[in-house]
């Protein structure tokens, strides 16, 4: 007998779909296509030499341990390194506050495992990170969203209305948001913490890009502002070094060391960590011992701070080239965001244009981006697109944006030449 496998799948498979970005990356792997589609760091600045030296040293000194099973929570020295990093933001953290995950993407999945029942509502920004929507759709979540502008999520009556719907939690990317590239202002950070506390709704703070700031001053993470609020309440202050607030903070080494490491972390209250550890044991037992120990060998002596300076310099140059090229080549009716850091900016085309149709023409002209609809929980954003500036070299950015400018100009001229009701 041949098993009809689709009849054996769980009901949750009905809500799962492949990533638009991952499928698009397959199409754009051809060497003659200039791609702004992926969220890819620049491979030419990966610290290959440092990893080569570190892996030899690690295998010579701790090889047996690196190749053995390890605790689910993660490699203790790496967890302490992260806790010390968090303390720079004014957060009282110990290694016991940290769970190492297989990329921050696994942290999103673990949150879904322990928190989401079918039909639960999650509040997100609009647009928001596609990977989070994918992770939680597998647990049959529904979404309610609040728009973002140049200062991040709109903290106004629209947010309060969404919170009155009783979402399970809020999902926020405060720094150089994926996909829009915008940053939540300090004023809105304080307001968001206050209103979340008022309605009793916890926050998932996803911060993969916070270390990649090119301009302006660093802003405190939401978890730090929440810790300040909780510290004023005797019954909810830190206990034995454990944070006991209302924010779960997610970080990653994918954007500062290398995405191939698949190393992320979660900083959370004790009860959340215990539940996520249990869930992770059923998923993968633990994140790779070798990878964790190797990463620690690379970062332990201050290399990471030096390397981030290199990344910021390279990405700032590429962002500036993309912004200048858009100003030079894009039609006046096309607008875009001005990210202060990170990997992405967001383009808004005339409302009559369909970004997916524009992409088809763009690929024919050997350039690609990601249409914005995939990032909108409500299916909107038809005339928007996400552009990655970190992966292409400056000369490629200039050429690619020029090609896209030509495509956009042609498509807009078609719209202008369409007969109106008065002339038809």
Image (spheres, rainbow, N blue to C red):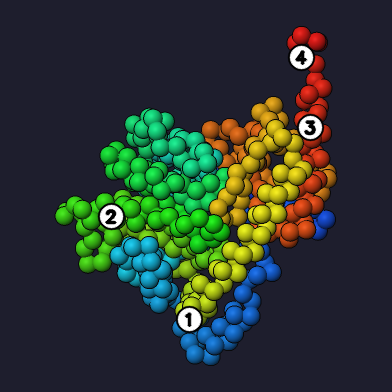
In the foreground, 274 or 31: 31
Horizontal arrangement in the rendering, residue 218 relative to residue 397 (left or right): left
The quadrant holding residue 355 is top right
**Dot 3: what SS?**
helix
Q: Which mark is residue 228?
A: 2
Q: Residue furthest bottom?
A: 60
CA gap, disc 1 and disc 4 = 67 Å
**Dot 4: what SS?**
loop
Q: Position of residue 346 (x, y in %)?
A: 62, 43
Asked if the residue at tag 4 contacts the one at tag 1, i.e. Cβ–Cβ closer than 8 Å, the answer is: no
Q: Residue at x 73, y 48 (%)?
A: 325
CA gap, disc 4 and disc 2 = 58 Å
Q: Which mark is residue 420?
A: 4
Q: Could you tell me if residue 297 is visible in this image?
A: yes
Q: Earlier in the sequence, mark 3 or mark 1?
A: 1
Q: Residues within 10 Å of mark 1 (few under 14, many from 20)?
A: few
In the foreground, 417 or 219: 219
In the rendered image of this protein, does residue 388 appear above or below residue 300? above
Q: Position of residue 362 (x, y in %)?
A: 78, 43
CA gap, disc 4 and disc 3 = 17 Å
In the foreground, 171 or 390: 390
The quadrant holding residue 234 is bottom left
Q: Position of residue 412 (x, y in %)?
A: 77, 30
In the foreground, 142 or 385: 385
Q: Residue at x 57, y 33 (%)?
A: 379
Q: Residues within 10 Å of mark 3 (few under 14, many from 20)?
A: some
- Badge 3 is on which residue? 411
CA gap, disc 3 and disc 2 = 51 Å
């Amino acid at each position: 007998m041949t098993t009809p496998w689709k009849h054996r799948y769980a009901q949750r498979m009905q809500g799962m779909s492949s990533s638009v970005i991952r499928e698009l990356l397959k199409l754009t792997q051809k060497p003659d296509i200039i791609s702004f589609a992926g969220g890819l760091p620049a491979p030419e600045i990966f610290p290959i030499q440092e990893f080569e030296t570190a892996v030899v040293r690690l295998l010579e000194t701790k090889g047996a341990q690196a190749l053995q099973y390890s605790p689910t929570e993660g490699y203790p020295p790496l967890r302490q390194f992260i806790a010390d990093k968090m303390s720079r933001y004014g957060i009282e953290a110990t290694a016991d506050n940290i769970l190492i995950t297989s990329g921050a993407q696994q942290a999103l999945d673990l949150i879904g495992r322990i928190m989401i029942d079918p039909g639960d509502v999650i509040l997100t920004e609009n647009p928001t990170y596609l990977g989070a929507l994918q992770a939680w759709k597998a647990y049959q979540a529904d979404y309610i969203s609040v728009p973002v502008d140049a200062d991040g999520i709109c903290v106004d009556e629209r947010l309060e209305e969404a919170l009155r719907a009783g979402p399970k939690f809020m999902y926020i990317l405060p720094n150089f948001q994926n996909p829009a590239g915008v940053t939540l202002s300090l004023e809105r950070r304080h307001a968001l913490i206050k209103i979340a506390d008022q309605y009793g709704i916890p926050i998932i703070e996803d911060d993969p890009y916070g270390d990649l700031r090119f301009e302006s001053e660093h802003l405190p993470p939401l978890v730090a502002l929440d810790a300040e609020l909780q510290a004023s309440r005797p019954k909810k202050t830190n206990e034995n070094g454990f944070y006991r607030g209302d924010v779960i903070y997610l970080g990653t080494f994918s954007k500062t060391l290398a995405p191939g490491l698949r190393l992320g972390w979660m900083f959370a209250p004790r009860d959340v960590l215990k539940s996520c550890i249990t869930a992770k044991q059923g998923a993968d037992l633990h994140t790779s011992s070798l990878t964790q120990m190797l990463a620690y060998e690379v970062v332990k002596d201050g290399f990471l701070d030096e390397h981030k300076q290199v990344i910021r310099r390279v990405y700032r140059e590429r962002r500036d080239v993309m912004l200048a090229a858009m100003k030079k080549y894009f039609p006046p009716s096309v607008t875009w965001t001005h990210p202060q850091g990170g990997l992405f900016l967001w383009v808004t085309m005339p409302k009559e244009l369909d970004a997916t149709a524009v992409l088809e023409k763009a690929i024919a002209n050997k350039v690609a981006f990601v249409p914005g609809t995939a990032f909108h929980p409500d299916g909107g954003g038809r005339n928007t697109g996400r552009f990655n500036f970190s992966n292409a070299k400056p000369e490629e950015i200039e050429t690619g944006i020029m090609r896209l400018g030509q495509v956009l100009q042609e498509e807009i001229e078609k719209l202008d030449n369409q007969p109106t009701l008065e002339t038809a």
